[in-house]
Image (tube, grey):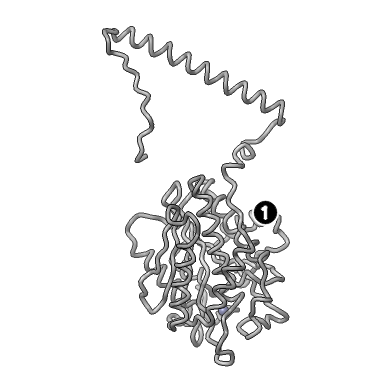
């Protein structure tokens, strides 16, 4: 479908409480019991009806007519991201230094991510984290927050950094750490949310290793972690279903403009655009027409729905990309928050609509 060289870039278990009428006990006949039940039910319905009607009338006079969606708005509002916290995580990940695939740096990065997740207040009750046993030398980290339905949406980012022979200590602020910061800040927000409410669906935050090609993108070089993860999904017979994959890559640029990869699933890209607009970020998003070889691609190949939120215009003429100029001073809390907020809004919207948008 897409030749790599054609890519622009590198590439109830709980039973409801039973109210238990004891109708036939104490010598009450079946008929009497039925009459009693009918009367009781009528009374219940009229009380309930009166409450509903008076509530609606009161609400109408106080608030004016309201639509269904605004009535539920409190319920469906996704958590919002703490941008400063996302920056702190990004800084911490950046400070680890180079995280080149199949080196100690990438392994340490995975261990650091898992440790950060475990340190989030309330995380032990809300979610779980694991470093997935490597299949091809990759250290993918997966954080899962269970929701109302076991069907899940993945928000992904890569945590490895490009091997640059010219810049041996290249640590990747935007190209690596920004996505890690976004996902860990999302984990923090979801852990808080889960103390109060159940998530509308299960959310998996996946940190991929081996996104960067060691030489150049081929079937076996680059996207190693995401390919391994997709293979794992294919071999998972638990019946759990991935409904969508939202990738965040290079979303930290101070001068943020996310151009959705042209090879994203159109229906999913449409939801991203709608939610970006609803969040007040319409000017920071557009639908791109360039296919991009990124971690969403193995998901597309496997028939999953995926979208790539990427700002592939980093510095004048993209000069900060894969160079020593990709440092923390080029990225901002606000930009990471923009992408992360939209990603969470998309998850909530999809789940609340029963994934009917896709
Ligand atoms: Zn890169």
**Quarter containing ligand 1?**
bottom right
Q: Image height check: is 331 above or below 304?
A: below
| Quarter of the view holding residue 7 | bottom right
Q: Position of residue 178 (x, y in %)?
A: 59, 71
Q: Residue at x 29, y 10 (%)?
A: 30
Q: Position of residue 332 (x, y in %)?
A: 67, 69
Is 83 positioned to the left or the right of 14 in the image?
right
Q: Position of residue 62 (x, y in %)?
A: 71, 28
* Residue at far bottom of view: 166
| Quadrant of the rendered image containing residue 284 | bottom right
Which one is in front, 216 or 332? 332
Residue ID for mark 1: 279
Element class at badge 1: loop
Q: Who is closer to the viewer here, 204 or 220?
A: 204
Q: Residue at x 67, y 52 (%)?
A: 278
Does 246 appear above or below 222? above
- Placement of 166 over or under 233, stated as above or below: below
Does residue 252 appear left or right of residue 19 in this picture? right
Residue 193, percent across and down? Answer: 53, 50
């Amino acid at each position: 479908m897409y030749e790599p060289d054609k890519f622009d870039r590198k590439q109830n278990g709980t039973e409801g409480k039973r109210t238990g009428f004891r109708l036939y006990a104490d010598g009450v006949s079946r008929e009497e019991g039925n009459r009693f039940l009918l009367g009781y039910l009528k009374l219940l319905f009229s009380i309930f009806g009166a409450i509903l009607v008076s509530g609606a009338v009161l609400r109408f006079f106080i608030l004016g007519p309201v639509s269904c969606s605004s009535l539920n708005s409190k319920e469906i509002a996704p958590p919002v991201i703490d941008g400063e916290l996302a920056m702190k995580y990004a800084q911490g990940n950046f400070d680890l230094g180079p995280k080149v695939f199949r080196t100690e740096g990438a392994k340490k990065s995975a261990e650091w991510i898992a440790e950060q997740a475990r340190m989030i207040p309330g995380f032990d009750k809300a979610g779980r984290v694991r470093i997935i046993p490597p299949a091809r030398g990759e250290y993918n980290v997966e954080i899962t927050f269970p929701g109302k339905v076991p069907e899940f949406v993945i928000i992904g980012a890569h945590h490895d950094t490009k091997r640059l022979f010219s810049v041996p200590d290249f640590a990747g602020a935007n190209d690596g750490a920004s996505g890690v910061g976004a996902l860990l800040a999302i984990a923090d927000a979801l852990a808080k949310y889960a103390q109060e409410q159940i998530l509308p669906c299960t959310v998996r935050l996946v940190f991929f290793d081996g996104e960067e090609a060691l030489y150049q993108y081929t079937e076996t070089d680059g996207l190693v972690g995401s390919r391994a993860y997709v293979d794992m999904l294919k071999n998972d017979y638990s019946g759990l279903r991935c409904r969508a994959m939202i990738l965040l890559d290079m979303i930290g640029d101070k001068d943020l403009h996310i151009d959705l990869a042209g090879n994203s699933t159109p229906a999913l890209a449409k939801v991203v655009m709608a939610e970006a607009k609803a969040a007040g970020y319409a000017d920071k998003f557009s639908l791109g027409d360039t296919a991009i070889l990124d971690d969403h691609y193995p998901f597309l190949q496997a028939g999953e729905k995926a979208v790539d939120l990427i700002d592939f215009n980093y510095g004048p003429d993209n000069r900060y990309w894969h160079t020593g100029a990709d440092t923390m001073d080029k990225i901002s809390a606000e930009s990471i928050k923009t992408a992360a907020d939209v990603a969470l809004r998309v998850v909530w919207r999809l789940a609340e609509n029963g994934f009917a948008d896709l």
